[in-house]
């Protein structure tokens, strides 16, 4: 997902074989995110912090586009991402096709 200013807001934790499936999953994320858990954790390679959002089954659905050096910066980015999802389309996000 890319914001209007060109910055990567989040990336999918899932792989999609076509653009339509990706677009559908984005719709599910936008409508169901309030029921999803998420938070900040260490990046897998141990070089900082990342945030992620999990579905009801516990599978990661969206993750930060990069690792953050500081926990507080990562937490702020996670909160901004959740706010973008709460905006009901007021803030334009796009999915870039491959």
Image (cartoon, rainbow, N blue to C red):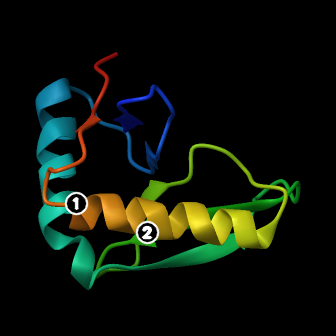
Q: Name the outermost residue toward the right.
A: 47
For the N terminus, which image quadrant?
A: top left
Residue for badge 2: 53
In the rendered view, tell whether residue 89 sits above or below residue 8. Answer: below
Residue at left offset 22%, top offset 38%:
22
**Res. 62 in view:** yes
Q: Nearer the viewer, residue 60 or 80?
A: 80
Q: Secondary structure at mark 1?
A: helix
For the C terminus, which image quadrant?
A: top left
Q: Nearer the viewer, residue 69 or 17?
A: 69
In the rendered view, tell whether residue 75 sits above or below residue 81. Answer: below
Horizontal and vertical percent for residue 12? Answer: 41, 46
Tell me, for residue 21, which label it has, or none: none
In the rendered view, tell whether residue 6 sits above or below residue 84. Answer: above
In the rendered view, tell whether residue 16 sits above or below residue 91. Answer: above
Horizontal and vertical percent for residue 75? Answer: 63, 71
**In the picture provided, is 3 more to the left or to the right than 22?**
right
Pointer 1: residues within 10 angstroms few (<14), some, or many (20+)?
A: some
Q: Nearer the viewer, residue 29 or 87?
A: 87
Q: Marks 2 and 1: CB-CB under 8 Å?
A: yes
Residue at left offset 38%, top offset 36%:
3
- Marks 2 and 1, how far apart at CA: 10 Å
Residue for badge 1: 29
Quadrant in the rendering for residue 86: bottom left
**In the picture provided, is 11 more to the left or to the right than 30?**
right
């Amino acid at each position: 997902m890319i914001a209007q200013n060109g910055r990567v807001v989040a990336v999918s934790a899932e792989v999609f074989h076509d653009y339509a499936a990706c677009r559908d999953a984005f719709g599910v994320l936008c409508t169901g995110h309030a029921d999803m858990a998420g938070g900040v954790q260490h990046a897998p390679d141990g070089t900082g912090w990342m945030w992620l959002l999990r579905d009801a089954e516990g599978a990661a659905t969206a993750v930060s586009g990069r690792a953050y050096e500081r926990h507080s910066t990562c937490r702020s980015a996670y909160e901004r991402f959740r706010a973008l999802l709460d905006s009901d389309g007021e803030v334009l996000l796009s999915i870039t096709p491959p």
